Amino acid sequence: MPDAAPHPMTPQDCLVALMIAISASDENMRTAELVKIESAVNMLPIFSDYDIDRMRVVTDLVFDLFEQEDGLDALFGLLRDNLPERLNETAYALACDVAAADGTLREEELRLLEEIRYELDIDRLHAAAIERGARARHLRA
């Protein structure tokens, strides 16, 4: 990402990368998931000073990583290096919201959420509460 990124990944880039990764995990980025990502970036305070043009760079990075054999490990390495620990639960919550946005959690999404919980060291009770909140926000009538 040397030419495309004028600076290293910001914490916000990491959050966007994780949301893109969960959406792309089943190889079908659904409209509801993309709308959820866009809404998060446009509305949440953590993104208030985020350069929206970085989303394309981050998206390309995630797709490039997913084409590599150890791409997911590389993504988690970038997250470990650039995402402050205080944002781990925020990252997991955003990933859960994107996964739940289309009303269906697919096997690939569930596996990636499990991996995210492990890699970000999310406490089991905290993870359950975050998951429950995402489920409640995305219930359909």
Image (tube, rainbow, N blue to C red):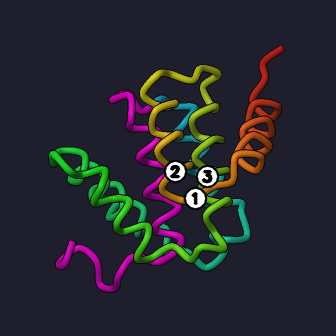
Residue 70 percent location from the top left of the image: 20, 50
Residue at 78% from the left image edge and 23% from the top image edge: 139
Mark 2 and mark 1 residues within 8 Å of each other at the beta carbon: yes
Quarter occupied by the C terminus: top right
Residue kind at label 3, given as amino acid type: Tyr
Residue under numbered circle 1:
121
Q: Is residue 25 shown in magenta?
A: yes
Quarter occupied by the N terminus: bottom left
| Of marks 1 and 3, the one in the foreground | 1
First in sequence, mark 1 or 3: give its number: 3
* Disc ID at residue 4: none
Residue kind at label 1, given as amino acid type: Asp
Residue under numbered circle 3:
92
**Circle 3 residues within 10 Å: few <14, some 14–19, many ≥20:** many
Residue at 56% from the left image edge and 49% from the top image edge: 117
Q: CA distance from mark 2 to mark 1?
A: 5 Å
